[in-house]
Image: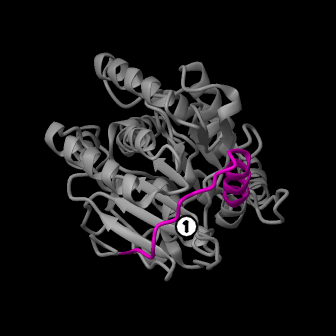
Amino acid sequence: MNKELVIHIITRLQAGGSAQNVIDSVIYQARERRTLLITGPYGGPEKLRLDLPENADYLELPELVRNISPLNDLKAFFRLKKIITELKPSIVHTHTSKAGILGRFAAWLANRKNRDAKALIVHTPHGHVFYGYFGPVRTFLFNQVERLAARVTDHFIALTCGELRESLAGGLGTPDKWLVIHSGVRFEPRAYENAKTDLGIAKEEIVIAVAARLEPVKGVEYFIRAAAELESRGLGKKLKFLVVGDGSLKTELMALAGGLGLGAKIVFTGFQREVYKYLAAADIYVQPSLNEAMGRTVLEAQYMKLPVVASKVCGLSDAVRDGVTAILVPPADPKAIAGAVEELIKDEQKRHRMREAGRRFVLEKDFTGYTRFSAESMNIQLKKFYNKVLAQHNRNLSVPGPLSIRHGGLRR
Protein backbone atom coordinates (compact mmCIF):
# COMPACT_ATOMS: atom_id res chain seq x y z
CA MET A 1 0.00 0.00 0.00
CA ASN A 2 1.32 3.43 -0.99
CA LYS A 3 1.83 5.57 2.12
CA GLU A 4 1.20 8.85 0.30
CA LEU A 5 -1.74 10.83 1.66
CA VAL A 6 -4.25 12.68 -0.53
CA ILE A 7 -6.56 15.19 1.13
CA HIS A 8 -9.84 16.08 -0.61
CA ILE A 9 -11.68 19.22 0.53
CA ILE A 10 -15.29 20.16 -0.32
CA THR A 11 -17.79 22.31 1.57
CA ARG A 12 -20.68 19.85 1.76
CA LEU A 13 -21.86 16.42 0.70
CA GLN A 14 -25.15 17.56 -0.79
CA ALA A 15 -26.72 15.32 -3.44
CA GLY A 16 -25.29 16.34 -6.78
CA GLY A 17 -22.48 15.72 -9.21
CA SER A 18 -19.59 17.40 -7.39
CA ALA A 19 -20.10 15.66 -4.03
CA GLN A 20 -20.76 12.26 -5.60
CA ASN A 21 -17.67 12.72 -7.75
CA VAL A 22 -15.54 13.40 -4.66
CA ILE A 23 -16.90 10.43 -2.70
CA ASP A 24 -16.28 8.06 -5.62
CA SER A 25 -12.74 9.42 -6.00
CA VAL A 26 -11.93 9.04 -2.30
CA ILE A 27 -13.18 5.44 -2.20
CA TYR A 28 -11.34 4.41 -5.37
CA GLN A 29 -8.05 6.17 -4.58
CA ALA A 30 -8.04 4.58 -1.11
CA ARG A 31 -7.12 1.29 -2.80
CA GLU A 32 -3.58 2.60 -3.28
CA ARG A 33 -3.18 5.70 -1.13
CA ARG A 34 -4.37 6.92 2.20
CA THR A 35 -7.14 9.43 1.64
CA LEU A 36 -8.74 12.02 3.88
CA LEU A 37 -12.04 13.71 3.02
CA ILE A 38 -12.59 17.06 4.72
CA THR A 39 -16.07 18.58 4.45
CA GLY A 40 -18.24 21.16 6.11
CA PRO A 41 -21.42 20.33 8.02
CA TYR A 42 -24.48 19.34 6.04
CA GLY A 43 -27.55 17.39 7.08
CA GLY A 44 -31.05 16.86 5.79
CA PRO A 45 -32.47 14.44 3.23
CA GLU A 46 -30.12 15.58 0.46
CA LYS A 47 -26.94 14.55 2.28
CA LEU A 48 -25.16 11.76 0.43
CA ARG A 49 -24.50 8.51 2.24
CA LEU A 50 -20.87 8.04 3.20
CA ASP A 51 -19.43 4.55 3.52
CA LEU A 52 -15.66 4.84 3.38
CA PRO A 53 -13.18 1.94 3.28
CA GLU A 54 -10.54 1.31 5.95
CA ASN A 55 -7.86 3.36 4.22
CA ALA A 56 -10.04 6.46 3.89
CA ASP A 57 -10.81 8.89 6.68
CA TYR A 58 -13.34 11.65 7.15
CA LEU A 59 -13.18 14.94 9.01
CA GLU A 60 -16.06 17.40 9.32
CA LEU A 61 -15.18 21.03 10.03
CA PRO A 62 -18.16 22.96 11.46
CA GLU A 63 -16.59 26.21 10.23
CA LEU A 64 -16.34 25.10 6.58
CA VAL A 65 -19.65 26.50 5.31
CA ARG A 66 -20.76 27.14 1.74
CA ASN A 67 -21.94 30.74 2.09
CA ILE A 68 -19.61 33.63 2.84
CA SER A 69 -19.14 33.94 6.61
CA PRO A 70 -16.01 35.96 7.53
CA LEU A 71 -15.57 34.52 11.03
CA ASN A 72 -16.23 30.91 10.01
CA ASP A 73 -14.11 31.30 6.89
CA LEU A 74 -11.16 32.54 8.94
CA LYS A 75 -11.53 29.66 11.42
CA ALA A 76 -11.82 27.10 8.61
CA PHE A 77 -8.76 28.54 6.88
CA PHE A 78 -6.52 28.23 9.94
CA ARG A 79 -7.82 24.75 10.78
CA LEU A 80 -7.10 23.59 7.24
CA LYS A 81 -3.63 25.13 7.36
CA LYS A 82 -2.91 23.37 10.67
CA ILE A 83 -4.13 19.98 9.39
CA ILE A 84 -2.15 20.22 6.15
CA THR A 85 0.98 21.38 7.98
CA GLU A 86 0.80 18.48 10.44
CA LEU A 87 -0.17 15.67 8.05
CA LYS A 88 2.17 16.66 5.19
CA PRO A 89 0.01 15.19 2.40
CA SER A 90 1.33 14.43 -1.08
CA ILE A 91 -1.65 16.15 -2.69
CA VAL A 92 -4.28 18.60 -1.51
CA HIS A 93 -7.19 18.29 -3.95
CA THR A 94 -9.88 20.95 -3.51
CA HIS A 95 -13.34 20.93 -5.04
CA THR A 96 -15.78 23.77 -5.88
CA SER A 97 -15.19 27.48 -5.40
CA LYS A 98 -15.40 28.13 -1.64
CA ALA A 99 -13.46 25.03 -0.53
CA GLY A 100 -11.07 25.69 -3.40
CA ILE A 101 -10.21 29.19 -2.25
CA LEU A 102 -9.77 28.35 1.44
CA GLY A 103 -8.08 24.99 0.83
CA ARG A 104 -5.61 26.17 -1.79
CA PHE A 105 -4.42 29.19 0.18
CA ALA A 106 -4.18 27.05 3.33
CA ALA A 107 -2.09 24.47 1.45
CA TRP A 108 0.10 27.21 -0.03
CA LEU A 109 0.89 28.61 3.42
CA ALA A 110 1.46 25.11 4.82
CA ASN A 111 3.91 24.48 1.97
CA ARG A 112 5.91 27.54 2.97
CA LYS A 113 6.47 25.88 6.35
CA ASN A 114 6.87 22.32 5.03
CA ARG A 115 9.58 23.25 2.55
CA ASP A 116 10.98 19.71 2.51
CA ALA A 117 7.56 18.09 2.06
CA LYS A 118 5.39 20.35 -0.04
CA ALA A 119 1.98 19.16 -1.18
CA LEU A 120 0.88 19.43 -4.78
CA ILE A 121 -2.15 21.71 -4.96
CA VAL A 122 -4.86 20.42 -7.31
CA HIS A 123 -8.23 22.05 -7.90
CA THR A 124 -11.39 20.79 -9.60
CA PRO A 125 -13.77 23.76 -9.92
CA HIS A 126 -16.82 21.66 -10.93
CA GLY A 127 -17.84 24.73 -12.93
CA HIS A 128 -16.72 28.35 -12.94
CA VAL A 129 -18.49 31.44 -11.58
CA PHE A 130 -17.92 33.77 -14.54
CA TYR A 131 -21.67 34.03 -15.21
CA GLY A 132 -25.02 32.67 -14.09
CA TYR A 133 -24.51 32.76 -10.32
CA PHE A 134 -24.27 36.32 -9.01
CA GLY A 135 -24.76 39.94 -9.97
CA PRO A 136 -21.94 41.85 -11.72
CA VAL A 137 -20.24 43.17 -8.55
CA ARG A 138 -20.08 39.82 -6.71
CA THR A 139 -19.10 38.07 -9.93
CA PHE A 140 -16.20 40.49 -10.42
CA LEU A 141 -15.00 40.04 -6.82
CA PHE A 142 -15.26 36.24 -6.95
CA ASN A 143 -13.37 36.13 -10.23
CA GLN A 144 -10.57 38.28 -8.84
CA VAL A 145 -10.17 35.92 -5.88
CA GLU A 146 -10.26 32.90 -8.21
CA ARG A 147 -7.47 34.40 -10.32
CA LEU A 148 -5.37 34.93 -7.18
CA ALA A 149 -5.97 31.34 -6.08
CA ALA A 150 -5.00 30.13 -9.55
CA ARG A 151 -1.50 31.50 -8.95
CA VAL A 152 -0.90 29.05 -6.09
CA THR A 153 -2.47 26.08 -7.90
CA ASP A 154 -0.22 23.43 -9.45
CA HIS A 155 -2.89 21.68 -11.52
CA PHE A 156 -6.54 22.08 -12.50
CA ILE A 157 -9.04 19.43 -13.58
CA ALA A 158 -11.98 20.47 -15.76
CA LEU A 159 -15.01 18.25 -16.27
CA THR A 160 -15.40 19.19 -19.94
CA CYS A 161 -13.56 20.95 -22.75
CA GLY A 162 -16.15 23.73 -22.55
CA GLU A 163 -15.31 24.38 -18.91
CA LEU A 164 -11.60 24.30 -19.75
CA ARG A 165 -11.93 26.85 -22.58
CA GLU A 166 -14.00 29.29 -20.54
CA SER A 167 -11.73 28.95 -17.48
CA LEU A 168 -8.65 29.76 -19.53
CA ALA A 169 -10.44 32.67 -21.20
CA GLY A 170 -11.29 33.94 -17.71
CA GLY A 171 -7.63 34.01 -16.70
CA LEU A 172 -7.48 30.88 -14.54
CA GLY A 173 -4.06 29.33 -15.02
CA THR A 174 -2.32 28.33 -18.24
CA PRO A 175 -3.08 25.44 -20.64
CA ASP A 176 -0.20 23.30 -19.34
CA LYS A 177 -1.80 23.25 -15.88
CA TRP A 178 -5.17 21.93 -17.07
CA LEU A 179 -6.51 18.43 -17.69
CA VAL A 180 -10.02 17.29 -18.64
CA ILE A 181 -11.53 14.34 -16.75
CA HIS A 182 -15.28 13.85 -17.06
CA SER A 183 -17.25 13.56 -13.84
CA GLY A 184 -18.10 9.89 -13.37
CA VAL A 185 -21.73 8.82 -13.57
CA ARG A 186 -23.07 5.50 -12.33
CA PHE A 187 -25.88 4.67 -14.72
CA GLU A 188 -28.90 2.83 -13.30
CA PRO A 189 -29.47 -0.45 -15.20
CA ARG A 190 -32.92 -1.04 -13.71
CA ALA A 191 -35.99 -1.01 -15.94
CA TYR A 192 -38.96 1.11 -14.88
CA GLU A 193 -41.64 -0.34 -17.13
CA ASN A 194 -44.61 1.17 -15.29
CA ALA A 195 -43.02 4.49 -14.34
CA LYS A 196 -45.87 6.68 -15.60
CA THR A 197 -48.56 4.55 -14.00
CA ASP A 198 -46.66 4.40 -10.70
CA LEU A 199 -46.55 8.21 -10.62
CA GLY A 200 -50.23 8.57 -11.49
CA ILE A 201 -49.57 9.85 -15.00
CA ALA A 202 -51.74 8.71 -17.92
CA LYS A 203 -49.84 6.76 -20.57
CA GLU A 204 -51.03 9.06 -23.37
CA GLU A 205 -49.62 12.16 -21.67
CA ILE A 206 -46.33 13.49 -23.03
CA VAL A 207 -44.10 14.20 -20.04
CA ILE A 208 -41.45 16.93 -20.19
CA ALA A 209 -39.09 16.87 -17.21
CA VAL A 210 -36.29 18.80 -15.56
CA ALA A 211 -34.26 17.51 -12.60
CA ALA A 212 -32.18 20.14 -10.84
CA ARG A 213 -31.56 22.09 -7.67
CA LEU A 214 -34.11 24.89 -7.54
CA GLU A 215 -31.52 27.66 -7.54
CA PRO A 216 -31.15 30.60 -9.97
CA VAL A 217 -28.22 29.12 -11.93
CA LYS A 218 -30.30 26.08 -12.93
CA GLY A 219 -32.74 28.25 -14.89
CA VAL A 220 -35.88 26.32 -13.88
CA GLU A 221 -37.86 29.56 -14.20
CA TYR A 222 -37.35 29.35 -17.97
CA PHE A 223 -38.56 25.75 -18.03
CA ILE A 224 -41.79 26.87 -16.33
CA ARG A 225 -42.25 29.79 -18.71
CA ALA A 226 -41.60 27.43 -21.64
CA ALA A 227 -44.27 25.09 -20.24
CA ALA A 228 -46.78 27.94 -20.25
CA GLU A 229 -45.75 28.83 -23.80
CA LEU A 230 -46.30 25.24 -24.95
CA GLU A 231 -49.73 25.13 -23.33
CA SER A 232 -50.69 28.34 -25.13
CA ARG A 233 -49.79 26.86 -28.53
CA GLY A 234 -52.57 24.28 -28.43
CA LEU A 235 -50.59 21.34 -29.75
CA GLY A 236 -53.48 18.93 -29.43
CA LYS A 237 -51.48 16.75 -27.05
CA LYS A 238 -51.88 16.14 -23.35
CA LEU A 239 -48.74 17.54 -21.73
CA LYS A 240 -47.42 17.03 -18.21
CA PHE A 241 -44.41 18.86 -16.76
CA LEU A 242 -42.21 17.44 -13.99
CA VAL A 243 -39.88 19.52 -11.82
CA VAL A 244 -37.71 17.10 -9.84
CA GLY A 245 -35.65 18.70 -7.08
CA ASP A 246 -35.69 21.14 -4.21
CA GLY A 247 -34.01 24.40 -3.33
CA SER A 248 -34.38 27.98 -2.17
CA LEU A 249 -36.59 28.97 -5.13
CA LYS A 250 -39.21 26.25 -4.72
CA THR A 251 -41.95 28.47 -3.26
CA GLU A 252 -41.24 31.22 -5.79
CA LEU A 253 -41.28 28.79 -8.73
CA MET A 254 -44.51 27.16 -7.59
CA ALA A 255 -46.09 30.61 -7.38
CA LEU A 256 -44.83 31.40 -10.88
CA ALA A 257 -46.36 28.18 -12.23
CA GLY A 258 -49.66 29.00 -10.55
CA GLY A 259 -49.62 32.55 -11.88
CA LEU A 260 -49.07 31.25 -15.41
CA GLY A 261 -52.11 29.01 -15.09
CA LEU A 262 -50.28 25.69 -15.25
CA GLY A 263 -52.14 24.26 -12.25
CA ALA A 264 -52.21 20.46 -12.27
CA LYS A 265 -50.26 20.38 -15.54
CA ILE A 266 -47.01 20.80 -13.60
CA VAL A 267 -45.82 18.64 -10.71
CA PHE A 268 -43.12 19.65 -8.21
CA THR A 269 -41.81 16.39 -6.76
CA GLY A 270 -39.37 17.84 -4.22
CA PHE A 271 -36.01 16.18 -3.61
CA GLN A 272 -35.84 12.60 -4.89
CA ARG A 273 -33.02 10.11 -4.45
CA GLU A 274 -34.38 7.89 -7.23
CA VAL A 275 -34.18 10.40 -10.08
CA TYR A 276 -34.15 7.57 -12.64
CA LYS A 277 -37.73 6.67 -11.73
CA TYR A 278 -38.85 10.13 -12.83
CA LEU A 279 -36.68 10.13 -15.93
CA ALA A 280 -38.25 6.80 -16.89
CA ALA A 281 -41.68 8.45 -16.76
CA ALA A 282 -40.57 11.28 -19.07
CA ASP A 283 -40.64 11.56 -22.85
CA ILE A 284 -38.43 14.65 -23.23
CA TYR A 285 -35.80 16.07 -20.87
CA VAL A 286 -34.97 19.79 -20.55
CA GLN A 287 -31.85 21.28 -18.94
CA PRO A 288 -32.34 25.09 -18.88
CA SER A 289 -29.18 25.93 -16.87
CA LEU A 290 -27.50 29.32 -17.13
CA ASN A 291 -24.14 27.70 -16.36
CA GLU A 292 -23.19 24.03 -16.13
CA ALA A 293 -19.78 22.38 -15.89
CA MET A 294 -20.99 19.13 -17.44
CA GLY A 295 -24.63 18.30 -16.82
CA ARG A 296 -24.71 14.97 -15.01
CA THR A 297 -28.50 14.63 -15.26
CA VAL A 298 -28.35 15.27 -19.00
CA LEU A 299 -26.15 12.17 -19.29
CA GLU A 300 -28.54 10.19 -17.11
CA ALA A 301 -31.46 11.33 -19.27
CA GLN A 302 -29.71 10.19 -22.45
CA TYR A 303 -28.95 6.85 -20.83
CA MET A 304 -32.69 6.57 -20.18
CA LYS A 305 -33.28 7.20 -23.91
CA LEU A 306 -34.69 10.69 -23.57
CA PRO A 307 -34.19 13.32 -26.29
CA VAL A 308 -32.74 16.41 -24.62
CA VAL A 309 -33.29 20.15 -24.95
CA ALA A 310 -30.47 22.02 -23.21
CA SER A 311 -28.93 25.47 -22.90
CA LYS A 312 -25.86 26.06 -25.02
CA VAL A 313 -23.59 26.99 -22.10
CA CYS A 314 -20.17 25.91 -20.83
CA GLY A 315 -19.97 22.11 -20.54
CA LEU A 316 -23.46 21.15 -21.72
CA SER A 317 -22.26 21.19 -25.33
CA ASP A 318 -19.85 18.37 -24.41
CA ALA A 319 -22.52 16.33 -22.62
CA VAL A 320 -24.68 15.94 -25.74
CA ARG A 321 -24.37 15.79 -29.52
CA ASP A 322 -26.27 18.77 -30.86
CA GLY A 323 -28.79 17.70 -33.48
CA VAL A 324 -28.11 14.02 -32.81
CA THR A 325 -28.97 13.38 -29.16
CA ALA A 326 -30.16 16.86 -28.22
CA ILE A 327 -31.25 20.29 -29.37
CA LEU A 328 -29.18 23.12 -27.90
CA VAL A 329 -30.89 26.48 -27.38
CA PRO A 330 -29.78 29.90 -26.10
CA PRO A 331 -29.88 30.24 -22.29
CA ALA A 332 -32.73 32.10 -20.55
CA ASP A 333 -34.96 31.79 -23.63
CA PRO A 334 -38.34 30.15 -22.85
CA LYS A 335 -39.60 30.50 -26.43
CA ALA A 336 -36.52 28.72 -27.78
CA ILE A 337 -37.04 25.91 -25.24
CA ALA A 338 -40.72 25.67 -26.18
CA GLY A 339 -39.87 25.65 -29.89
CA ALA A 340 -37.37 22.80 -29.50
CA VAL A 341 -39.77 20.77 -27.35
CA GLU A 342 -42.59 21.37 -29.84
CA GLU A 343 -40.36 20.13 -32.66
CA LEU A 344 -39.73 16.90 -30.75
CA ILE A 345 -43.40 16.47 -29.87
CA LYS A 346 -44.45 16.83 -33.51
CA ASP A 347 -41.64 14.74 -35.03
CA GLU A 348 -41.95 11.30 -33.47
CA GLN A 349 -39.30 9.83 -35.78
CA LYS A 350 -36.75 12.43 -34.72
CA ARG A 351 -37.63 11.77 -31.12
CA HIS A 352 -37.01 8.05 -31.64
CA ARG A 353 -33.67 8.65 -33.41
CA MET A 354 -32.48 10.86 -30.58
CA ARG A 355 -33.59 8.33 -27.98
CA GLU A 356 -31.42 5.61 -29.48
CA ALA A 357 -28.50 7.92 -30.30
CA GLY A 358 -28.44 9.26 -26.74
CA ARG A 359 -28.05 5.83 -25.18
CA ARG A 360 -25.27 4.94 -27.66
CA PHE A 361 -23.49 8.24 -27.01
CA VAL A 362 -23.22 7.88 -23.23
CA LEU A 363 -22.15 4.23 -23.48
CA GLU A 364 -19.24 4.86 -25.87
CA LYS A 365 -15.97 3.56 -24.41
CA ASP A 366 -12.72 5.47 -24.06
CA PHE A 367 -9.08 4.41 -23.75
CA THR A 368 -9.66 3.02 -20.24
CA GLY A 369 -11.97 0.33 -21.63
CA TYR A 370 -14.92 1.78 -19.70
CA THR A 371 -17.64 4.12 -20.89
CA ARG A 372 -16.17 7.60 -21.02
CA PHE A 373 -18.65 9.16 -18.59
CA SER A 374 -18.35 6.33 -16.06
CA ALA A 375 -17.01 6.56 -12.51
CA GLU A 376 -14.50 3.82 -13.43
CA SER A 377 -13.04 5.87 -16.28
CA MET A 378 -12.88 8.98 -14.09
CA ASN A 379 -11.02 7.18 -11.31
CA ILE A 380 -8.55 5.40 -13.60
CA GLN A 381 -7.67 8.74 -15.21
CA LEU A 382 -7.37 10.44 -11.83
CA LYS A 383 -5.06 7.68 -10.58
CA LYS A 384 -2.84 8.05 -13.68
CA PHE A 385 -2.81 11.81 -13.20
CA TYR A 386 -1.76 11.54 -9.53
CA ASN A 387 1.00 9.07 -10.41
CA LYS A 388 2.28 11.27 -13.24
CA VAL A 389 2.39 14.59 -11.40
CA LEU A 390 3.95 13.09 -8.28
CA ALA A 391 6.65 11.44 -10.38
CA GLN A 392 7.29 14.68 -12.28
CA HIS A 393 7.74 16.63 -9.09
CA ASN A 394 9.96 13.90 -7.66
CA ARG A 395 8.35 14.14 -4.25
CA ASN A 396 10.25 12.52 -1.40
CA LEU A 397 7.55 13.04 1.13
CA SER A 398 7.86 12.92 4.86
CA VAL A 399 5.12 10.49 5.83
CA PRO A 400 3.44 10.92 9.24
CA GLY A 401 2.48 8.03 11.44
CA PRO A 402 -0.89 6.30 11.24
CA LEU A 403 -3.78 8.69 11.53
CA SER A 404 -7.31 8.10 12.65
CA ILE A 405 -9.92 10.59 11.59
CA ARG A 406 -13.51 9.56 12.10
CA HIS A 407 -16.75 11.37 12.68
CA GLY A 408 -15.19 14.81 12.99
CA GLY A 409 -12.35 13.83 15.31
CA LEU A 410 -8.66 13.89 14.49
CA ARG A 411 -6.08 12.01 16.49
CA ARG A 412 -2.73 10.28 16.09
The answer to which of 306 and 339 lies nearer the viewer is 306
The C terminus lies in which quarter of the figure? bottom left
Decide whether residue 390 is among the magenta residues: yes
Query: Is there any visible trace of residue 349 in the rendered image?
Result: yes
The image quarter containing residue 31 is bottom right
- The reply to whether residue 205 is in sight is no
Residue 15 image position (x, y, % from top left):
40, 61
Left or right: 187, with 286 as reference point: right
User: Who's the residue at 81% across and 62% down the image?
Assistant: 368
Looking at the rendering, which quadrant does residue 134 occupy? top left
Q: Is residue 407 placed above or below 172 in the rendered structure?
A: below
Query: Which residue is identified by label 1?
Result: 24
Residue at (55% x, 55% y) in the render: 90
Along the line of sight, the residue nearer the viewer: 190 or 20: 20
> Is residue 155 shown left or right of residue 37?
right
Q: Residues within 10 Å of mark 1 (few under 14, many from 20)?
A: many
Which type of secondary structure does the marked residue at label 1 adopt?
helix
- In the picture as drawn, the residue positioned furthest to the bottom comes out as 54
What number of labels is visible? 1
The three-letter code of the residue at mark 1 reads: Asp
Residue 207: x, y in percent?
51, 57
Image spot of residue 143 (x, y percent): 41, 23
> What span is colored magenta in the figure?
381-404
Judge by depth and name the residue closer to the eye, 260 or 397: 397
Does 47 appear above or below 341?
below
Residue 164 lies within the magenta run: no
- Residue occupying the point 34% across, 52% down: 11
Looking at this rendering, what residue extends furthest in the left direction? Answer: 71
Residue 183 image offset from top left, x and y in percent: 60, 54
Q: Quadrant of the N terminus?
A: bottom right
Give the residue drawn at x 33%, y 20%. 141
